[in-house]
Amino acid sequence: MKSLLVASLLALVGLAGFVHAADKPNVIIINIDDLGYADVGAFGSTLNRTPNVDRMASEGCKLTSYYAAPVCSPSRAALMTGCYPKRALCIPHVLFPIGGNGLSPKEITIAELLRDQGYATACVGKWHLGDQPEFLPTRQGFDVYYGLPYSNDMGPVADGVRSNLGEPVKAGNPEKGQPPLPLMRQETVLQRVLPEDQCKLVENYTNEAKSFITANKDKPFFLYMPHSAVHFPLYPGKAFHNKSKNGLYGDWVEEMDWSVGQVLETVRSLGLSEKTLVIFTSDNGGTNRGFNTPLRGHKGSTLEGGIRVSTIAWMPKSIAAGSTCNVITGMIDVLPTVVGLAGGTVPTDRVIDGRDLWPSLTGKPDAKPPHDVFYYFRGLVLEAVRQGPWKLHLAKNELYNLDSDIGEASNVASANPNVVAQITALAQAMDGDLGVKEKGPGVRELGTVADPKPLIDHAGKVRAGFEAK
């Protein structure tokens, strides 16, 4: 009778009732680089074969109005901090090697908050929130790090960063431009990344992820898996080369899908499915190599195709199979959602823009939309504001109803002056927080170092203290 009573109580409180470390839900975030909204079958692709992502969607919840950022570093800052990118990483574009800036060590990341709850934490893949020691994942809450500190196109041209697989490597002055790409483990540089190494990235990341999950199967874990795929240059693994109907890009999308399947199968085989939340997403909209249908625009813009990304949440029995979440959500919401599931609390000494998505993901009847308003920043500039279905592009005074016109084809500003006025007022009010064109009072300190140095110099010498032992 006592055991039956306990079981009944646990069923009533659900995930919110997790107390002991062994009962806390695991969290896996798979973040693809530059994936188009319709590059996977679950979101409309008929060209790329993505059976594993499609299965994940059929077993979980599709988030159809989920926002990242126009480019990668800001998007990753939003994910790590639960804040609009401009608040936590106020930069005009993206971070570059030896640029001297990064996510401030004063920021409190999702990894730090989960580690405080007893989680083992790992980052496997592309970081891109600063390449100086102070900014690396190991200094931002991750116990384990394996991957590239920035994009796979950031290196010397002669190292193949401007050439796809099978193309002649372009010539370049090895003494100029960006330093070589370093593959890292913890704070050790393992090697300089050349074309043949790029072809192994997805496989290596996948093996590292599987090993981490297996090693931590008996304790709560947080795995952040930001892929280098499918960012240019395109380097699918040899087993996937020339296998798709969509060229090199399709090859890499399909290898990415294979990786998702490997991670999920590891979770299933260990009996962890019902206590593991897996989120699949992209850091920004797709480039013109991919498909963003039915959205307009591409990466780098605040059109829907530049910032709305295909996203899936999977946790069998907690999240209904085949469900859909259409309300405004985004990278900013991941931190409060998973920290709440883990039994923690979000920081109260600073602004957190994100909200807890769990009621919406699990279809609670009384769930309130986490956001009525979303602000579209491109770098320092507020370019658009969405309220409910209405989206106003500020510079051109273009208004679209995204419920009926997701492709932003018909400007209805003249027919809806009251809506335009209301959203314009929201934008003006933001000038007192993050600022509309410049830094506002709500912008926090950017991480800065005075004398940045490359992790590998052009001669191939590894920075002191980062050499492989």
Image: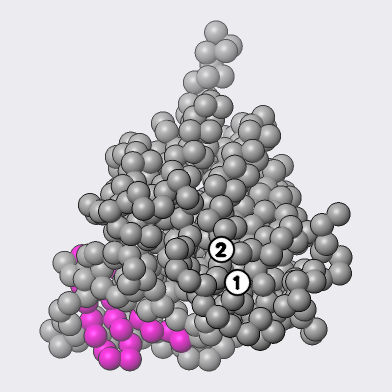
> Where is mark 1, residue-wise?
159
Q: In the rendered image, is residue 230 in sight?
A: yes
- In which quadrant is the C terminus drawn? bottom right
Q: In the rendered image, is residue 312 in sight?
A: no
> Where is mark 2, residue-wise?
195
Q: Point out residue 440 in the picture as x, y percentages from the top left corner.
A: 56, 87
Is 138 left or right of 110, judged from the image as shown?
A: right
| Quarter of the figure with residue 304 | bottom left
Q: Depth check: give the residue in front, 273 or 187.
A: 187
Q: Could you tell me which residue is drawn at 52 percent across and 60 percent down?
A: 228
- Amino acid at circle 2: Pro
Q: Depth check: give the residue in front, 289 or 25.
A: 289
Q: Point out residue 93 in the picture as x, y percentages from the top left corner.
A: 52, 81
Q: Depth check: give the residue in front, 451 or 83.
A: 451
Q: Point out residue 135 in the picture as x, y percentages from the top left corner.
A: 72, 69
Q: Does the magenta stretch include residue 459?
A: no
Q: Which of marks 1 and 2 is nearer the N terminus?
A: 1
As drawn, the label of residue 450 is none
In the rendered view, tell whether residue 397 sits above or below residue 116.
below
**Residues at badges 1 and 2 in contact (C-beta under 8 Å)?**
yes
- Judge the density around disc 2: few (<14), some (14-19), many (≥20) Cα neighbours within 10 Å: some
Q: Depth check: give the residue in front, 462 or 74.
A: 462
User: Which residues, given as a range, are shown in magenta?
Assistant: 381-403
Q: Is residue 391 magenta?
A: yes
Q: Report the residue that reaches farthest toward the front.
A: 168
Q: Point out residue 394 in the picture as x, y percentages from the top left corner.
A: 33, 87
- Amino acid at circle 1: Asp
Task: Identify the element where label 1 is drawn.
Answer: helix
In the rendered view, tell whether residue 158 sits above or below residue 62.
below
Q: Could you tell me which residue is drawn at 69 percent across and 43 percent down?
A: 120
| Quarter of the figure with residue 212 | top right
